[in-house]
Image (spheres, rainbow, N blue to C red):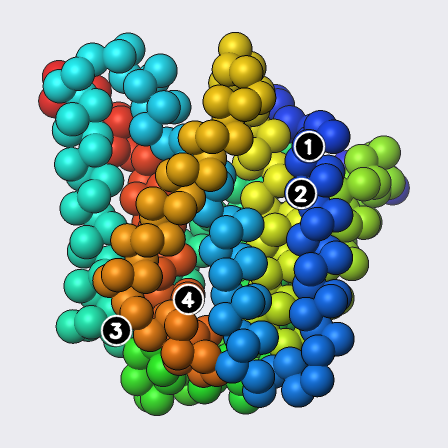
Amino acid sequence: MQLVLPMAPSPVFEPGAGVRAFELCAITIAFVVSSAADASDSGAVAVIATLVFLVGGLPHGAFDIHLAARQAGVSRSRLIGFAAIYIALFAIMLAGWRFAPAVTLPIFLMTAIVHFSADWPEIDEPVFRLALGSAPLCAIGIGNLGEVEAIFAAMSTPAIALWAARIFILVAPVTLLIAGVALAVMANCGARRRPALFAVLLTSLLFLPVLIGFALFFCAFHTPRHLAEIRGQLGHWPKARVIAVGAGMTGLALLLGGLAMPLIFAGGLMTAATGFQVLAALAMPHQCMELILRRLGRSA
Protein backbone atom coordinates (compact mmCIF):
# COMPACT_ATOMS: atom_id res chain seq x y z
CA MET A 1 0.00 0.00 0.00
CA GLN A 2 1.38 3.41 -0.98
CA LEU A 3 1.31 6.21 1.58
CA VAL A 4 -0.02 9.42 0.07
CA LEU A 5 0.59 12.77 1.75
CA PRO A 6 -2.53 14.96 1.87
CA MET A 7 -1.68 18.05 -0.14
CA ALA A 8 -3.33 21.43 0.30
CA PRO A 9 -4.46 23.53 -2.66
CA SER A 10 -2.59 26.61 -1.41
CA PRO A 11 0.30 27.67 -3.67
CA VAL A 12 3.94 27.13 -2.82
CA PHE A 13 6.11 30.02 -3.91
CA GLU A 14 9.39 28.79 -5.31
CA PRO A 15 12.41 30.99 -4.57
CA GLY A 16 13.96 32.93 -7.40
CA ALA A 17 17.60 33.72 -8.03
CA GLY A 18 17.70 36.48 -5.41
CA VAL A 19 16.22 34.29 -2.69
CA ARG A 20 18.54 31.41 -3.58
CA ALA A 21 21.48 33.83 -3.25
CA PHE A 22 20.09 34.74 0.19
CA GLU A 23 20.13 31.04 1.13
CA LEU A 24 23.70 30.58 -0.12
CA CYS A 25 24.87 33.67 1.77
CA ALA A 26 23.27 32.38 4.99
CA ILE A 27 24.90 28.97 4.65
CA THR A 28 28.29 30.50 3.90
CA ILE A 29 28.16 32.88 6.86
CA ALA A 30 27.01 30.12 9.21
CA PHE A 31 29.88 27.82 8.32
CA VAL A 32 32.45 30.62 8.43
CA VAL A 33 31.25 31.69 11.87
CA SER A 34 31.03 28.10 13.12
CA SER A 35 34.66 27.54 12.17
CA ALA A 36 35.81 30.28 14.55
CA ALA A 37 37.71 29.12 17.60
CA ASP A 38 35.52 28.50 20.66
CA ALA A 39 32.47 29.62 18.69
CA SER A 40 29.99 28.76 21.42
CA ASP A 41 31.92 30.72 24.04
CA SER A 42 33.03 33.75 22.05
CA GLY A 43 31.17 36.96 22.82
CA ALA A 44 31.88 38.37 19.38
CA VAL A 45 30.67 35.23 17.61
CA ALA A 46 27.47 35.29 19.67
CA VAL A 47 26.78 38.87 18.59
CA ILE A 48 27.53 38.07 14.94
CA ALA A 49 25.34 34.95 14.89
CA THR A 50 22.50 36.81 16.62
CA LEU A 51 22.68 39.68 14.14
CA VAL A 52 22.73 37.16 11.29
CA PHE A 53 19.45 35.55 12.31
CA LEU A 54 17.86 38.91 13.11
CA VAL A 55 19.00 40.61 9.89
CA GLY A 56 18.26 37.46 7.91
CA GLY A 57 14.92 36.76 9.54
CA LEU A 58 13.28 40.14 9.97
CA PRO A 59 12.87 41.10 6.28
CA HIS A 60 9.92 38.73 5.82
CA GLY A 61 8.01 40.81 8.39
CA ALA A 62 9.18 44.13 6.99
CA PHE A 63 6.37 44.27 4.44
CA ASP A 64 3.45 43.69 6.82
CA ILE A 65 2.12 47.25 6.60
CA HIS A 66 2.24 47.16 2.79
CA LEU A 67 0.52 43.77 2.62
CA ALA A 68 -2.04 45.02 5.14
CA ALA A 69 -2.70 48.06 2.96
CA ARG A 70 -3.60 45.77 0.07
CA GLN A 71 -5.83 43.52 2.17
CA ALA A 72 -7.43 46.42 4.00
CA GLY A 73 -8.49 48.05 0.77
CA VAL A 74 -6.22 51.05 1.45
CA SER A 75 -8.60 52.28 4.17
CA ARG A 76 -6.77 54.86 6.26
CA SER A 77 -8.72 54.13 9.44
CA ARG A 78 -8.07 50.39 9.18
CA LEU A 79 -4.40 50.95 8.48
CA ILE A 80 -4.09 53.21 11.51
CA GLY A 81 -5.87 50.60 13.60
CA PHE A 82 -3.61 47.88 12.23
CA ALA A 83 -0.47 49.88 13.00
CA ALA A 84 -1.69 50.69 16.53
CA ILE A 85 -2.42 47.05 17.38
CA TYR A 86 0.82 45.93 15.72
CA ILE A 87 2.91 48.32 17.85
CA ALA A 88 0.90 47.45 20.98
CA LEU A 89 1.65 43.73 20.54
CA PHE A 90 5.34 44.53 20.16
CA ALA A 91 5.25 46.59 23.37
CA ILE A 92 3.31 43.88 25.24
CA MET A 93 5.89 41.26 24.33
CA LEU A 94 8.73 43.50 25.50
CA ALA A 95 6.88 44.11 28.76
CA GLY A 96 6.25 40.38 29.06
CA TRP A 97 9.95 39.59 28.93
CA ARG A 98 10.59 42.21 31.60
CA PHE A 99 7.75 41.54 34.03
CA ALA A 100 6.42 38.02 33.27
CA PRO A 101 9.17 36.02 31.54
CA ALA A 102 7.91 32.72 32.96
CA VAL A 103 4.68 33.19 30.98
CA THR A 104 6.22 34.80 27.93
CA LEU A 105 8.72 32.01 27.18
CA PRO A 106 6.06 29.27 26.69
CA ILE A 107 4.01 31.68 24.56
CA PHE A 108 7.07 32.36 22.41
CA LEU A 109 7.79 28.66 21.94
CA MET A 110 4.19 27.78 21.06
CA THR A 111 3.84 30.63 18.56
CA ALA A 112 7.20 29.71 17.02
CA ILE A 113 5.95 26.16 16.40
CA VAL A 114 2.76 27.47 14.79
CA HIS A 115 4.77 29.89 12.66
CA PHE A 116 7.25 27.24 11.50
CA SER A 117 4.34 24.93 10.69
CA ALA A 118 3.20 27.55 8.18
CA ASP A 119 6.37 26.83 6.19
CA TRP A 120 4.53 23.82 4.75
CA PRO A 121 1.38 25.16 3.02
CA GLU A 122 1.48 22.26 0.56
CA ILE A 123 0.75 19.77 3.38
CA ASP A 124 -2.86 19.44 4.44
CA GLU A 125 -2.32 16.92 7.25
CA PRO A 126 -2.12 18.90 10.55
CA VAL A 127 -0.09 16.22 12.36
CA PHE A 128 2.64 16.36 9.70
CA ARG A 129 2.65 20.17 9.71
CA LEU A 130 2.83 20.30 13.50
CA ALA A 131 5.71 17.81 13.55
CA LEU A 132 7.63 19.71 10.88
CA GLY A 133 7.03 22.98 12.74
CA SER A 134 8.22 21.49 16.03
CA ALA A 135 11.18 19.57 14.60
CA PRO A 136 13.70 22.48 14.51
CA LEU A 137 13.10 23.33 18.17
CA CYS A 138 13.30 19.67 19.16
CA ALA A 139 16.54 19.19 17.23
CA ILE A 140 18.11 22.23 18.89
CA GLY A 141 16.86 21.05 22.28
CA ILE A 142 18.27 17.53 22.18
CA GLY A 143 21.46 18.53 20.37
CA ASN A 144 22.38 21.33 22.76
CA LEU A 145 20.39 20.61 25.91
CA GLY A 146 22.73 22.38 28.34
CA GLU A 147 23.10 25.46 26.15
CA VAL A 148 19.36 25.64 25.48
CA GLU A 149 18.56 25.35 29.18
CA ALA A 150 21.04 28.14 29.99
CA ILE A 151 19.55 30.43 27.30
CA PHE A 152 15.99 29.72 28.48
CA ALA A 153 17.03 30.43 32.08
CA ALA A 154 18.46 33.81 31.01
CA MET A 155 15.25 34.51 29.07
CA SER A 156 12.87 33.51 31.89
CA THR A 157 13.55 31.56 35.10
CA PRO A 158 15.64 28.43 35.84
CA ALA A 159 12.50 26.45 36.74
CA ILE A 160 10.72 27.28 33.47
CA ALA A 161 13.94 26.66 31.53
CA LEU A 162 14.27 23.19 33.05
CA TRP A 163 10.63 22.42 32.28
CA ALA A 164 10.88 23.60 28.67
CA ALA A 165 14.14 21.75 28.00
CA ARG A 166 12.74 18.51 29.42
CA ILE A 167 9.62 18.85 27.26
CA PHE A 168 11.88 18.88 24.19
CA ILE A 169 13.55 15.67 25.35
CA LEU A 170 10.15 14.06 25.95
CA VAL A 171 8.54 14.89 22.60
CA ALA A 172 11.59 14.97 20.33
CA PRO A 173 11.77 11.25 19.36
CA VAL A 174 8.16 11.03 18.17
CA THR A 175 8.22 14.51 16.64
CA LEU A 176 11.38 13.88 14.63
CA LEU A 177 10.10 10.46 13.54
CA ILE A 178 6.83 11.92 12.22
CA ALA A 179 8.71 14.77 10.56
CA GLY A 180 11.02 12.25 8.89
CA VAL A 181 8.04 10.31 7.55
CA ALA A 182 6.50 13.51 6.16
CA LEU A 183 9.77 14.47 4.43
CA ALA A 184 10.18 10.99 2.96
CA VAL A 185 6.64 10.94 1.60
CA MET A 186 7.05 14.42 0.11
CA ALA A 187 10.27 13.35 -1.59
CA ASN A 188 8.53 10.23 -2.90
CA CYS A 189 5.79 12.46 -4.35
CA GLY A 190 8.41 14.36 -6.35
CA ALA A 191 8.95 17.43 -4.14
CA ARG A 192 12.59 16.75 -3.27
CA ARG A 193 14.37 20.11 -2.94
CA ARG A 194 12.66 21.50 0.17
CA PRO A 195 12.54 18.19 2.09
CA ALA A 196 16.23 17.58 1.34
CA LEU A 197 17.24 21.10 2.43
CA PHE A 198 15.13 20.82 5.57
CA ALA A 199 16.63 17.43 6.45
CA VAL A 200 20.19 18.76 6.06
CA LEU A 201 19.46 21.85 8.16
CA LEU A 202 17.62 19.78 10.78
CA THR A 203 20.66 17.54 11.10
CA SER A 204 22.94 20.56 11.44
CA LEU A 205 20.83 21.78 14.37
CA LEU A 206 21.88 18.67 16.28
CA PHE A 207 25.58 19.48 16.03
CA LEU A 208 26.07 23.23 15.60
CA PRO A 209 25.94 25.67 18.52
CA VAL A 210 22.44 27.01 19.13
CA LEU A 211 22.90 30.50 17.70
CA ILE A 212 24.75 29.37 14.59
CA GLY A 213 22.41 26.47 13.88
CA PHE A 214 19.31 28.60 14.36
CA ALA A 215 20.72 31.40 12.19
CA LEU A 216 21.44 28.89 9.45
CA PHE A 217 17.95 27.35 9.59
CA PHE A 218 16.17 30.68 9.87
CA CYS A 219 18.02 32.31 6.98
CA ALA A 220 18.40 29.31 4.66
CA PHE A 221 14.93 27.78 4.98
CA HIS A 222 12.33 29.81 6.87
CA THR A 223 12.89 33.32 5.54
CA PRO A 224 13.48 32.48 1.83
CA ARG A 225 10.07 30.82 1.48
CA HIS A 226 8.32 33.82 2.99
CA LEU A 227 10.35 36.25 0.90
CA ALA A 228 9.39 34.33 -2.24
CA GLU A 229 5.73 34.50 -1.20
CA ILE A 230 5.95 38.23 -0.49
CA ARG A 231 7.69 38.81 -3.82
CA GLY A 232 4.78 37.06 -5.50
CA GLN A 233 2.23 39.19 -3.66
CA LEU A 234 4.11 42.40 -4.46
CA GLY A 235 4.97 41.38 -8.01
CA HIS A 236 4.13 44.85 -9.31
CA TRP A 237 6.89 46.38 -7.18
CA PRO A 238 10.28 46.95 -8.82
CA LYS A 239 13.14 45.02 -7.22
CA ALA A 240 14.82 48.21 -6.00
CA ARG A 241 11.73 49.16 -4.00
CA VAL A 242 11.50 45.69 -2.44
CA ILE A 243 15.13 45.88 -1.34
CA ALA A 244 14.80 49.45 -0.04
CA VAL A 245 11.66 48.73 2.00
CA GLY A 246 13.02 45.44 3.34
CA ALA A 247 16.32 46.97 4.38
CA GLY A 248 14.74 50.12 5.81
CA MET A 249 12.10 48.37 7.91
CA THR A 250 14.59 45.74 9.09
CA GLY A 251 17.00 48.48 10.16
CA LEU A 252 14.21 50.29 12.02
CA ALA A 253 13.16 47.07 13.79
CA LEU A 254 16.75 46.37 14.85
CA LEU A 255 17.14 49.92 16.11
CA LEU A 256 13.98 49.69 18.22
CA GLY A 257 14.98 46.26 19.51
CA GLY A 258 18.50 47.42 20.37
CA LEU A 259 17.21 50.51 22.18
CA ALA A 260 14.65 48.48 24.12
CA MET A 261 17.10 45.68 24.99
CA PRO A 262 20.70 46.93 24.81
CA LEU A 263 22.02 43.69 26.37
CA ILE A 264 21.79 42.20 22.90
CA PHE A 265 25.34 43.49 22.36
CA ALA A 266 26.70 42.19 25.68
CA GLY A 267 28.07 39.00 24.13
CA GLY A 268 27.79 35.37 25.12
CA LEU A 269 24.70 34.07 26.91
CA MET A 270 23.04 37.46 27.34
CA THR A 271 23.30 38.17 23.62
CA ALA A 272 21.65 34.83 22.82
CA ALA A 273 18.84 35.32 25.33
CA THR A 274 18.20 38.95 24.40
CA GLY A 275 18.37 38.19 20.68
CA PHE A 276 15.59 35.61 21.00
CA GLN A 277 13.56 38.00 23.15
CA VAL A 278 13.84 40.74 20.52
CA LEU A 279 12.93 38.26 17.80
CA ALA A 280 9.88 37.13 19.78
CA ALA A 281 8.74 40.71 20.37
CA LEU A 282 9.02 41.56 16.68
CA ALA A 283 7.57 38.25 15.51
CA MET A 284 4.41 38.29 17.61
CA PRO A 285 2.60 41.09 15.71
CA HIS A 286 3.86 39.63 12.42
CA GLN A 287 2.36 36.25 13.28
CA CYS A 288 -0.93 37.88 14.34
CA MET A 289 -1.22 39.96 11.17
CA GLU A 290 -4.12 38.03 9.62
CA LEU A 291 -5.96 37.89 12.95
CA ILE A 292 -5.61 41.66 13.37
CA LEU A 293 -6.98 42.30 9.89
CA ARG A 294 -9.95 39.97 10.41
CA ARG A 295 -10.71 41.68 13.73
CA LEU A 296 -10.62 45.12 12.10
CA GLY A 297 -12.77 43.84 9.25
CA ARG A 298 -15.51 42.68 11.65
CA SER A 299 -15.46 45.99 13.52
CA ALA A 300 -15.56 48.10 10.35
Task: Identify residue for label 2.
Answer: 22
Discs 3, 1 touching: Cβ within 8 Å: no
Q: Quadrant of residue 105?
A: bottom left
Residue at 25% from the left image edge and 73% from the top image edge = 101
Residue 260 to residue 165: above or below: above
Residue 51 in the figure: left or right of residue 186:
left
Whichever of labels 2 and 4 marks the residue nearer the N terminus, that label is 2
Where residue 116 appears, x then y in whole percent?
53, 50
Q: Residues within 10 Å of mark 3 (few under 14, many from 20)?
A: many
Q: Residues within 10 Å of mark 1 (few under 14, many from 20)?
A: few
Q: Nearer the viewer, mark 3 or mark 1?
A: 1
Give the numbered dot on residue 18: 1
Q: Are marks 1 and 2 in contact (CB under 8 Å)?
A: yes
Which residue has dot 3 on it?
101
**Helix, strand or loop under label 2:** helix
Q: Secondary structure at mark 1?
A: helix
> What amino acid type should be assigned to the residue bearing mark 2?
Phe
Decide: marks 4, 3 in contact (CB < 8 A)? Answer: no
Q: In the structure shown, which secondary structural element does the residue marked by tag 4 occupy? A: helix
Q: CA distance from mark 3 to mark 2?
A: 33 Å
Q: Quadrant of the C terminus?
A: top left
Q: CA distance from mark 2 to mark 4?
A: 21 Å
Q: CA distance from mark 3 to mark 1?
A: 38 Å
The residue at 57%/87% (across/down) is 41
Q: Is 273 positioned to the left or the right of 208 in the image?
A: left
Q: Name the amino acid type tagged 1.
A: Gly
Name the residue beneath numbered marker 4.
Answer: 275
Q: For marks 4 and 3, give the one nearer the viewer.
A: 4
Q: Give the number of marks.
A: 4
Q: Could you give the CA–CA distance between mark 1 and mark 2, rounded to whole angstroms?
A: 6 Å
Badge 3 marks a residue whose secondary structure is helix
Q: Within 10 angstroms of label 2, few (less than 14), some, or many (20 or more) residues?
A: many
